[in-house]
Amino acid sequence: MTAPEAAEAELARRAADGDEAAAAALMALVRPGVVRYCRASLGPVAGAYTTADDVSQEVCIAILRALPRYRDLGRPFSGFVYTIAARRVADAQRAATRTRTAPASTLPERADGAPGPEQRAVAADLARRMSRLLGYLPDTQREIIVLRVAVGLSADEVGTVLGMSAAAVRVAQSRALAKLRKLAPALLDEVPA
Amino acid sequence: MTTSAPEPVDLAVVTADDALLDALGRGAPAPGGDRTAALLVAWRADLSGGAPDRAVAGDPGRARRHRLRWVRPGIAAAVLVVLFGGLVAGTVTATPHSPLWPLAAAVNPGRADILTADSKLAEARRAIGTGRYADARRLIDEAAAVVARVRDPQQAKRLAIELADARRRLSEAGSGTGPGARPTPTPPAAPQPSGPPAPTPRPSPGNGVPVPGVSLPSGILPTLPLPSLPSLP
């Protein structure tokens, strides 16, 4: 484990032992990554991440509830966090497919029609294209990109979460990048800027 | 679905890709000319809810208002829910010296009173043990005030007993019968003649409502007989 990972594991150990201050600090540390993970995995609905953010709350609560069961086994705490997060996200996806109301059609796509002076709109547009692009990746590769880039985990941590060796993660992430590189130009040039 | 046979992986490429993803994961900017990396950076920034506004182009004002109206309260609510989710769990075990105590007290004032009383009584016993009788007396009086608010009959009874015990120890220690006794430095301020007539302490007759009788005004009765508890039904 790297030094920050070890510090996080130590914090988690104290939180698991009932130290509320440690639990609060731990959640402050973990939460931004969880939010990005849920947003990346669930995507925006009607242009907002409200649903994803709801799920990220559930994830944080689930982590706190599960904390007493956390035992530091020499593995990074992120393994614990994102295993829980992945399960919650999968639950949310299943629920969404059951009650699907064609969210894609409600996306405000008008932004695409405007030629580029509005920087923020362009950036948001790029982001949306990226999440569509990720949809072309196999599940594991997409999960790796989400954990590596959106959350910011190391290859080793991702390996812990996904039950793979770090080397396997590195090979898979290279394949994912190669695929994204191949697909990106088509997607970028889809609408003339 | 674009599934094609995976190409053989070049170690140098793997290493470079790993370094790139490490950098992007830290929020670093994309290397110049790498459009895919630029896409990933824009995506990550969007996920962070940071600079790039998920705005509708052409009416940034409306988009901003939209964000202010919904997103901020949404985030605030998320933070609150997360905090509460964690903290409510935390408040169950919070004690008067822990950081979550103010929240715990707000969430469950009844339990807060009980824990406060326990905490003050424990401090009082420590004060007696170290000869700080004035402190002990003050703490016992403070505890008595809190105990008076406790509504749970069993807890109130238990605290009344502990309170009486603490007063007995204080009087023993202070009057020279206790270990390490020395003249009690307590100020004579304790009895309050203007107060309501002191309710007589009852060695709880077992009817389960000891609270009003036991929460004594400070210092009137230095020694309370330790009520023996006829078992409650």
Image (cartoon, grey):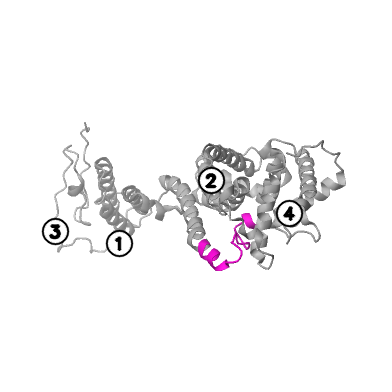
* Side of A131 where B65 appears, left or right: left
What's the residue type where badge 2 is placed? Val
Disc nearer the start of the sequence (1/3): 1
Asked if the residue at tag 3 contacts the one at tag 2, i.e. Cβ–Cβ closer than 8 Å, the answer is no
What's the residue type where badge 1 is placed? Pro
Q: Do labels 4 and 2 share a chain?
A: yes
Asked if the residue at tag 3 contacts the one at tag 1, i.e. Cβ–Cβ closer than 8 Å, the answer is no
* Side of A166 where A57 appears, left or right: left
Q: Mark 2 lies on which chain?
A: A
Q: What element carries label 3?
A: loop
Q: Mark 4 points at which residue?
A: A190
Residue A144 x %, y %: 70, 43
Kindly identify the residue that appears in the image at 80 percent across and 61 percent down.
Answer: B32
Q: Name the residue under label 2.
A: A55
Residue A88, visible in the rendered structure: yes
Q: Label 3 crowding class (10 Å Cα cut-off): few <14, some 14-19, many 20+? A: few
What's the residue type where badge 3 is placed? Pro
Q: Are marks 2 and 1 on the same chain?
A: no
Q: Name the residue under label 3.
A: B196
Q: Gap in Å between the C-alphas at discs 1 and 3? A: 26 Å
